Amino acid sequence: MELPRHIGIIMDGNGRWAQQRSLVRTQGHLEGLKAAKRITKAASDIGIKYLTLYAFSTENWKRASDEVNFIMGLVKQFLRSEMDFSVKNKIRVRHAGDFSGLPHDIQKEISQTMEDTSGFDGMQVILAINYGGRDEIIRAVRRYISGGNISDISEKELSSYMDNPDIPDPDLIIRSAGECRTSNFLLWEGAYSEIFVSKKLWPDWDREDLEDALENYKKRERRFGGIANVA
Ligand code: IPE
Ligand code: IPE
Ligand code: MG
């Protein structure tokens, strides 16, 4: 099988990485940011078209405010420090999730980056921040019923109300740090995604880990509910 067009990554394990080194959790997030940059670069070099990074879920607000604020600060840092890279590699940055629920300074930063990169035709990086799959579906349904007749709802129609309807469904969803669950990531779009779980904690991720996931993906047979192709 060829390369996945769209990869989604659940970047998990920052806290455990820090804990293993007797460091504070925020230190793990800082290293996680570096891993996100390495993997973004690797994915762009490899020729991936869409990369969705799960950076903050709708449930992550349950964490201590210090940790939440630190992560929001890192989001800003990521957007600013990646600008040169985005320009050079024609990376278009987008957002998935409940934008209105984000702090205003983060909203401003994301809007600015999306605007500055909107004309680029290289890889698209979708930052899932304040993202929840259930929340996305609820927001889509709300938008749909405000403009249409609920009785004629179809999968195709509702899909067009999701956060980024022009982006193809993820072919591959990767999760670092070993947990075998979706944690509310791309519930609608990931219905037939191949899932790759790695034990490696996110801050330790490097280009080779992405390549391993891609090697593994190549061997998969996607049937979408049909039956195997026999020669
Ligand atoms: C993932 O790492 C980053 C976010 C959820 C924001 P965690 O912070 O969940 O790390 P663990 O799971 O506690 O190790
Ligand atoms: C998923 O990780 C969310 C992100 C990576 C942003 P969590 O650490 O929040 O997920 P759970 O709590 O282990 O399910
Ligand atoms: Mg976690």
Image (cartoon, rainbow, N blue to C red):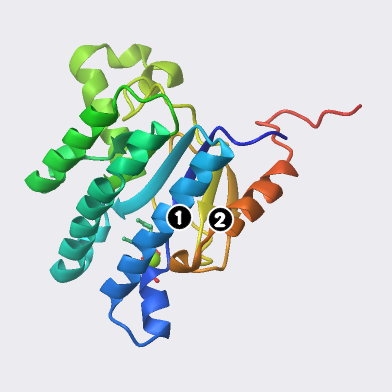
Q: Which residue is mark 1?
A: 38
Camera sees residue 177: yes
- Foreground of the two, 65 or 42: 42
Up-down: is 169 above or below 63? above
Give the crowd class for mark 1: few <14, some 14-19, many >=20 residues within 10 Å: some
Quarter of the image where the C terminus is located: top right
Q: CA distance from mark 2 to mark 1?
A: 7 Å
First of labels 2, 1 by sequence position: 1
Q: Tag 2: Cα neighbours inside 10 Å, few (<14), some, or many (≥20)?
A: some
Mark 2 secondary-structure assignment: helix
* Callout 2–callout 1 Cβ contact below 8 Å: yes
Ligand 3, by image quadrant, is: bottom left
x and y percent of residue 178 in the render?
53, 66
Residue 148 is marked as none
Amino acid type, residue under disc 1 in the picture: Arg
Residue 49 percent location from the top left of the image:
50, 32
Residue sitting at x 37%, y 82%: 19
In the visual, does 219 lie left or right of 9?
right
Residue 2 placement, left or right of 82: right
Residue behind mark 2: 207
Residue 139 in the image: state x and y as whole percent.
24, 32
Residue 186 position within the rendered picture, expressed as x and y whole percent measured from the top left: 42, 41
Q: Callout 2, which amino acid?
A: Arg
**Residue 186 appears anywhere in the view:** no
